[in-house]
Every structure is written in C-alpha cells, then in structure tokens.
Image (tube, rainbow, N blue to C red):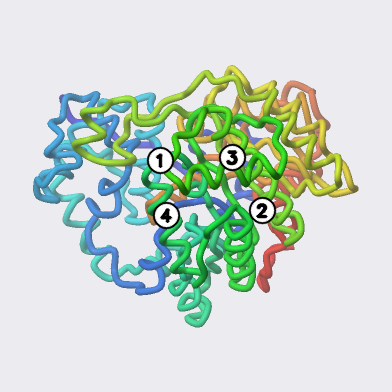
Amino acid sequence: MSQINSKNFITDNFLLNSQEAEVLYHEYAKDLPIIDYHNHLSAQQIAENKPVNNITNAWLSEDHYKWRGMRANGVEENFISGDASKEKKFMKWAETVPNTLRNPLFHWTQLELKRYFNIDEILQPNNALEIYSKTNRVLETKTPAQLLEQMKVEVICTTDDPTDDLRYHKQIAKARFFTKVYPTFRPDNLFFIGEQKFDTYLGKLEDCVNFSISNYSNLLKAIDNRIDFFHENGCKLSDYGISGVFSFVDFNDDEIQSVFDKNLRGVKLTELEIQQYRSSLLMHLSKKYHEKGWVQQFHLGVIRNNNDRLNELVGADAGCDSIADYPIIESLSKFLNALDRTDQLAKTITYNLNPAQNEVFATMMGNFNTGGVSGKMQWGAAWWFLDQKDGIEKQLNVLSNMGLLSKFIGMLTDSRSFLSFPRHEYFRRILCDLMAEDIRKGLVPNDISFIGKMIENICYNNAVNYFQFNITNKFS
C-alpha cells in the first residue's frame, strides 16, 4: 500500500461539520474532566505506577478489538496473542491500520497517537519503526497516573471480583493521585452453580470471609460481608456481565436452599434449578445494592467464546465474542418489577449489545423511573461493537426519542488500556455535531448557551451527580 497522506485529518475540528458544532465542542465539551465509570484497568498497575514502557504492551496485549482487526487482515496468531517480539507485533498492527479505514479502530488509533504522543502521521508500514521508537520514548517515563491526569480523568471505576482484597485501591487512595480510583463489585463467578469452577470459587470465598459456606444462608452472609467491605473502600457501583440468556424465574427460599444443598452434594442440577438459584441471587444482590445506595449495571446481549479452537489456544477474552439475539426483555421486566414492587430498585444502567433491541431497552428503562430520582433508570452508552460513530448516533437518537437525553450520564471506555481515553473526546465530538445539526435544521432552539449547558451535563455533571462521587475539583 502506498503512503497515506495524513495532512488535515485529526484537526481541531475533526468530526465537527458546522460552526455551531465547533462552538459547542470547543467552548462546552472539550475541556471537561472525564468520569470513566466502567473500565477494566488494572488497579495494581495504577498503584505500582511504573512507566507503561512499551506501546505494544499498552495497545496490543489485551485489546481484542485490534486482535479481530489483525486476524481479518490475515495476520498469523503468533503476531497477535503469541510469543512474537513486541516490535514485530507492532509492525503487524501497522500493516493492519491502513486496512481499518471506516472501522472505528482507524479513528481511535490516530486520536491516541495525536493526544498522547503528538503524532499526526497515519500509522502504516513505512513509518512504523519511527512511531514505535517515538511512542516508546514517551512511555519509558509516563506512568499510568500521569497518563490519566494528562487526559483529565477525575474518576475511574475498575471491575473487581468480590474476593479481591482491594489492597491496590487502598494504596491508590493513600497516594492521592489526581485520578480517584473506585472498585466495582462484579459477582459473575457466583452465578456458575453446577460447574466445577463454582465449587472452586466457593472455597476461595470461604478463605476470604473465614467461615464455611455450608448452606445458602451462609453464602448470602458471605456476599453481604464482601459488599460491606467494598462499600467501606469507596465502592459505589456493581456490575453484571454473565453471557447467555438473562433469565428471571419464580422461586421460593426453600427451593433455593434445596438447590444449593444438591450442588454441595455433587448432584447434577436441572436448568430450571440453575435459573432459580440465579434469580434468587440476583434479587438478594440488587436489594443489597439498593440498601447501600449503589448503582447496578447490566451488560446484556453478548454470545461469548464462539471459536473453540481460538479460545483453547488463547484463553478467555480471545476476541471471538459477538452480538447475541437472545430473548431478554421479558425477564428484565419481571426482575425490575419485582424490585420496584417493594421499593428496593437501585439506580440501574443497562447496556445492550444488539442494536435491533435499542428501542426495546430504551422504553423498558423508562417504565421504572420512580421515586423522584433524576435519571434513575439509564439506558447506557453504546457498548462494545456499538461504541463507534454510527452506534453512538443511533443510541443518542433513540434515547432522545424514547427518554430524556438531557439526563444521560454519558460515555465510558470499557477498556483495558491506559491510552483509550480519547474515546470520550470521540463521543463528545459526535454529540456536539449531532446537536449542532438539529440547530441548523431548526429542530431545537438556536441558543448555544442552552444547548451547551445540556452538553456539559451529559459529558460530565450528570455522572458526578448520579454516582455521588466525592470530587473536590468538580466542574460546576
């Protein structure tokens, strides 16, 4: 492929297609701090705060977006997840980048090169070694805390197992970095009853709470113990990311005790018994979240590990997950209604991966906006395969039509990379361009300060108020 002319690509007005869009972005959105309330960054890396050191580590070590792109470009697995050298892996990524045109990877790559390294050139084979060296020189001295502060990231919420001792979060709190780092309680491992890994996990949980989990009541006691511990260490959110069908079925306490006892005895459970256990567990967790004043998140609509050979070769998160077409909404309705009936429904965010269900999710969340809480039920930001320009615009438009865009809590990265935060800029530019187009079409008042305040709220203020983060340098 011939050299790509990079002149005038990532400009100050990238994605901004009118003067109104430029004003909205530059005067109202651009300089806002970032609240990244869901990601998979390593608290250990932040606490230890050692230089990131290498662009391959930062970009390619766990990024299944890039892995999928490289595989589609015909790159051998050894250069993706294998043991090839870091430089060779980067070179293969550089070969792939020009072929990602019209994929969000192309935009994200160039935004990250520009924002973190002041590199304007399009990454490609003929400049890859130069860019590899330049980025590594920067990363040899840049620590995670510095990279986060550089992007004005005020808050991040990591994703943490209930058995985590949160030692690194405690270290971060004492270090007083610019960025506050809060844990998120993600109890996915508690849902795999009937599988060998569930029994192993119960042993790990027992070690954590220092008592035997010999019945279901003791399991709930252990869960409450860990929720209390997370709460004491600043946790304000939970998350649920189980793949497969989200199912909520009827159950009673005696049935669940019996199901749990059968599992302990090694008796194979029926599918109904598994779903009864999961439904009971969901209810208990959600009521506890409400008691603590937490926000609960549900990531729904993914089918994972479709490629057995690749999954066995690489392991979990190999990059062979995709959009699912499961029936979800009736169970979600039943679940939310059961909590609302007793006034124990916490603030809730749902993220759906199937765009065919956008309107379905948006309208379902609107059914439970009760209790006088502003924006209580959130249909969350465009997620995973949908967090690109088209997916973001569709999410914003559906939310505008079915709910209140003005109460939206905005973007998140859902990322494992310390270089992913220009995705907030990407979202903000798309939002400002969308609102500016409405101004130009006469669909909203031609009042820049009015629209600008709404943009400030979506990009920052709404999230601060929704999660009640303790931020001393709050924007407004």
The residue under label 1 is: 195
| First along the sequence among labels 4 and 3 | 4
Q: CA distance from mark 1 to mark 3?
A: 13 Å
Q: Earlier in the sequence, mark 2 or mark 1?
A: 1
Q: Residues within 10 Å of mark 2 (few under 14, many from 20)?
A: many
Disc 3 marks a residue whose amino acid type is: Arg
Please name the residue that numbered disc 2 is placed on. 460
Residue 106 location (% of width, % of height): 35, 33
Apparent side of residue 43 relative to residue 234 in the rendered image (left or right): left
Residue at mark 3: 278
Residue annotated with mark 4: 201
- Helix, strand or loop at label 1? It is loop
Q: Earlier in the sequence, mark 1 or mark 3?
A: 1
| Foreground residue among 314 and 28 | 314
**What crowding class fits label 3: few (fewer than 14 Cα within 10 Å), some (14-19), or many (20 or more)?**
many
**Within-10-Å neighbours for mark 1: few <14, some 14–19, many 20+:** few
- Which badge, 3 or 2, is on the more N-terminal residue? 3
Q: Quadrant of residue 327?
A: top right
Q: CA distance from mark 4 to mark 1?
A: 10 Å
Query: Tag 4, which secondary structure?
Result: helix
| Residue 166 falls left or right of residue 471 | left
User: Distance from label 4 to label 3 (Cα)?
Assistant: 16 Å
Residue at x 27%, y 35% (from the top left corner): 67
Q: CA distance from mark 3 to mark 2?
A: 35 Å
Query: Residue at position x 18%, y 44% from top?
Result: 90
Indicate the secondary structure of the residue bearing disc 3: helix
Q: Secondary structure at mark 2?
A: helix
Q: Is 345 on the left-hand or right-hand side of 43?
A: right
